[in-house]
Amino acid sequence: MQSVQIVLFLVAMATVVATFAGRIRVPAPSLLVVAGVAVGMLPIAEQIHVTPEIVSLVVLPPLLYAAGEELSWRELRRLWRPVTLLAVGLVLVSAAAVGFVTTLLTPLPIALGFVLGAVLASTDPVAVTALGRRLALPPRLQTLVQAESLFNDATSLILFRIATAAAVAGGVAGWSSVAVDFVRLAAGGAVVGAVVAAGVSFVRRRTEDPILESVVALIVPYLGYVLAEAVGASGVTAVIVSAVIIGARQHELTDARIRLQLAAVYGTVIFLLESVVFSLIGLQLPGQIRHLAASERPWVAAVLVVALTLVVVRVAWMVPLTALFQRRGGGRFRPSWPVSAVVSWAGARGVVPLAAALSIPLTTASGQPLPHRGLLVVLATGVIVISLVVQGFTLAPLVRLSGLAVPAGDSQAEYVRARRRLTDVAARHVEQLADLEAAPPAVLHQVRRSLRIQQELDQEQEDLTGTYGQIRREVVAVQAEALARMHAAGEIGEGTYRRLQRRLDRQDLRYIEE
């Protein structure tokens, strides 16, 4: 019963803090971490123990899946080169730099130093996505930051598994062994993710029950993760690949009613998980510090230097990358120096590094306690907290200072233009029906009238069934097709596309016959 009370306390605290963060216009993840550290200093925190399984198996899959579904497939195809350079190259360089610095500042041996480097090498998609929702970033920049955080997690966790296996075995793996393991984990996870996406797509095309659809959607991330881990592949990679594939085909798999329900269900689940997990990050640090050995107490300087190293390496990677893409034209991606500054500072760490840090084995292959494991976890958690607090609170001002923030008026203007286009498409379709005499003139007149009234959703006395309702749904379907074409052609951004899709879904739901 006590564990239930603790969970309820965490949910209540996280909900209050997240609501307060929205009112004072600060990032909720950063404020939740601060609140977690404060609560972690209280006696009650001694009773809160987080196991690696809770974070990696219960919390992580749905959060990764939700972040992957939000990716714009169109923008991702345009940005695959810079995403690859950041998600693979930067992760390897960051892991090596952190490993080297850690061995100089702490008693950690080189093998454990690289374990810490692998833990902290990647940015966190949950933190980046949560922070990014508050920022009015251009669609392409938002996709770049979010895609990098997703795919570099796969690289980092694969590298972590390899580094951990070497550290536990008491040696350093050869390059050929590392390469084989990397390909096996990455390729295996991608294949499992694609198979899960294909199977789920097959089922969802043949399901019209909103409750069953909600259950299937909630199971998918866990299914991909567990299946991949069972066959020795990367569960994180499987979840990300399945999320990107299903997210790109979401409109084909469900109707308006189910999409609206799934948005509500998943929105609630993600809010609760994000709120609790960021609180847990802060809660972990005070207790971990209390359990450090006396010889490991000088950890503060090491945490600060490691955090600074990650930022410096990221900036040093972005400067030549930006110059290279500017010089060569970069294809469809030509970053400016303000873009480079924002991407460099958007490298927050969070849930994924925490899950990796907590899953560091307790013993070596010989059964002896893993030396300095407590220090490893403290260093990882300390860097995560600093990253979320410092970068989290300062990212929004940097975006505004860089001039990259999309003005609210521009987003609204794009939304209004797209709405007018959809209304014009609907009106032309109605006129085609009139020319073909495909419906009674009185019904067509009523449809025209409803199209001219912008607040037709507030008209409670309309006849929503029969021929009128059928034609209105047909008109909505035509608008949805036009919206998809505008999005595919790049005429509107991802945010405008999703807002208008939700609006059309609500209209479509209104005209469904009971």
Image (spheres, rainbow, N blue to C red):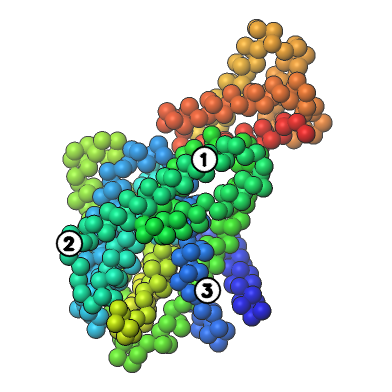
Residue 391 placement (x, y as % from top left) = 39, 63
Whole-number angstrom distance, CA of label 3 to CA of label 1: 41 Å
Quote the CA–CA distance across marks 1 and 2: 39 Å
Indicate the quadrant containing the C terminus: top left, top right, bottom left or bottom right.
Answer: top right
- Residue 68 or 413: which is nearer the viewer? 68
- Residue at position x 57%, y 36% from top? 205
Residue 449 position (above or below residue 243): above
Q: Amino acid at mark 2?
A: Trp
Q: In which image quadrant can residue 357 be found? A: bottom left
Residue 206 image offset from top left, x and y in percent: 60, 37
Q: Which residue is mark 2?
A: 175
Residue at mark 3: 35
Foreground mark, 3 or 1, reads 1
Q: Is residue 266 left or right of residue 375?
A: right
The quarter of the picture where residue 349 lies is: bottom left
Nearer the camera: disc 2 or disc 3: 2
Identify the residue under disc 1. 201
Give the mark, 2 or 3, whose residue is nearer the N terminus.
3
What residue do we see at 52% from left, 44% from top?
200
Is residue 422 at all visible to an observer of this figure?
A: yes
Residue 148 location, x and y as percent?
35, 51
Label 3 neighbour load within 10 Å: few <14, some 14-19, many 20+? many
